[in-house]
Image: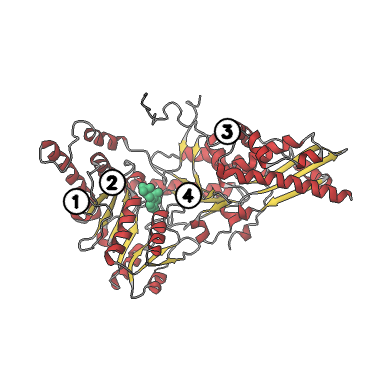
Amino acid sequence: MTPIIHKAEVKGKQGQNWLYTKEVKEHFFHPKNTFKSVEEEEEFEKNADGIGEVGSPACGDMMRMYIKVKDGIIVACRWKTFGCASAIASTSILSEMVIGKTLDDARKIKPKDIVQKLKGLPQRKIHCSVLGDKALQKAIDNFEKKKR
Amino acid sequence: MKSNKKTIYLDNAATTYTDERVVNAMLPYFGTMYGNPHSLHSYGLDAQKVVDISRESVAHILSCTPQEIIFTSGGTESVNLAIKGVAFSKGSGHIITSKIEHPAVLRTCEFLEKNGFTVTYLNVDKDGIVNPQDVQKAITKNTILISIMYANNEIGTIEPIQDIGNIARKHNILFHTDACQATGSLSLDVSHLNVDLMTLNGSKVYGPKGVGILYTRNGVTLQPLIHGGGQEFTMRSGTENVPAIVGFAKAMEYAHREKKKENKRLIQLRDTFITNVIKTIPKSFLNGHPTERLPNNVNISFLDVEGESVLLYLNEKGIAVSTGSACSSKELEISHVLDAIGLKHDAAHGSIRFTIGRKTTTQDLKYVLTVLTPIIETLRRISPVKVKKSEIRK
Ligand SMILES: Cc1ncc(COP(=O)(O)O)c(C=O)c1O
């Protein structure tokens, strides 16, 4: 049997260890579909077809999703998130996932789909991404209520 | 490659690097002088001698006798030995501590509660100070021990332990202080501090990790937690960690010798940094006492952003800090210390602790501010939260 030799060193890697996957890192440091300007934000506040919000800063994470819908398809999405890296990254990647999807398909997005797209999250962080899809569902509800 | 990137370590309350002089002092005790202090041959006697010298050196700094110094494996063990050691030797009774202690103290007290002891966890004021009058009022005829930290590890607040010790002494109750954060910068002279037990930590004073001290006043009876060969006056069995003991004593000597000058330098850096951050970044405020504060501690809350995000953005720029906000399995939790000083969760999530150290310079802190300002702006831009500054307290 070959003995196992533990390598108890991080030499040469100093300062390069990172808590999350490459995908999380990309979306955390370069979040997608955020507001480009105050004007754009005001425009979405006024004209978005649906807005959904979940969470509260008191419990740690809070997310707001804005969608624009055309012929039953999400054509634009913006978001705001208060929370840790995985909360920010999961909302960011979700915003990319929904654009071009029908409302029905968007509704079907589950937390595990978001986690998969991010190539995994630490177990204790998964609750964060659960919120992104709930915010989206609320935004869709909001759109459908307005339509009626 | 990251090699040319600037790195600034501002987490000295978590641990410090080990001083090169300390490392050099330790090296022979890994190499040629590896004897067991218990052995009767020359190897053993050499080791025994250096442990004795180290103990004397520490005793000198504390103004106590060498027999009152017990070397342990760190802050956590010292705290456990102090609190359980007193509790188990008395058998039953009441303990007084505060809500802002380190988990080493809090979890130990909770354990004792499950084993028949009663514990009072005192509130602190908005700056994190324990009121000695509250200690006085909490005393019952069953009180066996008071344990209040010397200085808080998160917000840096220095507690009035001399006054608390005075009260304890008047009532003939043992007093322990967790001085892990105070080891390098505050007075450790037990002839003035009115303490019976004091925990010190090597890893926060440019010494090695995994070594601590429990100062135990002559005449205080403790039930040891670790039984065996009877080392450390039977209070802590097990072959002594000779290199770490040597290193800790050396580290304390240097810290003690350079304390006055270094504290002055740190306080100046600290206060300039606090002023500049609060002036430059809107909706930010200091946690902890403005002056009764460790020379190296800056703890600031930035409203509308979450601490871990700030920490990781800073880390990307080579700056290492810590936060009072942490993800648990259910929700984002805030530190028990920020909770105890009355911050609402909304306001506590954005707290960042910067703890400066021997190598920190004015330039470093200027750089940190130039990096920090846009980070907070960026994160606020994507945040849906807008906390009013008037609504930060419960
Ligand atoms: C106030 C306080 N008490 C106890 C400890 C525990 O020390 P250690 O981790 O060395 O056992 C620490 C260190 O984090 C501390 O800051």
Question: In percent of the image, x 30 and y 45: which residue is there?
Answer: B211
Marks 4 and 2, how far apart in space? 23 Å
Among the two numbered marks 1 and 4 on one chain, the one whose residue lies closer to the N terminus: 1
The answer to whether B171 is drawn above or below residue A4 in the figure is below
Marks 2 and 1, how far apart in space? 26 Å
* Mark 3 touches mark 1? (CB < 8 Å): no
Three-letter residue code for mark 3: Thr
Mark nearest the camera among 3 and 1 is: 1
Q: Which residue is mark 1?
A: B230
- Rate crowding at label 4 as few (under 14), some (14 to 19) or many (20 or more) other CA atoms within 10 Å: many
Q: Which residue is mark 2?
A: B252
Question: Helix, strand or loop at disc 1?
Answer: loop
Three-letter residue code for mark 2: Met
Quadrant position of residue B165: bottom left
Q: Which residue is mark 3?
A: A21
Of the pair B158 and A87, the residue shown nearer to us: A87
Are dots 4 and 3 on a single chain? no
- Does B63 sit left or right of B94 as displayed? left
Mark nearest the camera among 4 and 3 is: 3
Q: Which residue is mark 4?
A: B298
Among the two numbered marks 2 and 1 on one chain, the one whose residue lies closer to the N terminus: 1
The answer to whether B192 is drawn above or below residue B34 in the figure is below
- Does B149 sit left or right of B390 as displayed? left
Among the two numbered marks 4 and 2 on one chain, the one whose residue lies closer to the N terminus: 2
Q: Where residue B367 appears, x then y in whole percent? A: 52, 37
User: Which quadrant of the figure contains the C terminus of chain B?
Assistant: bottom right
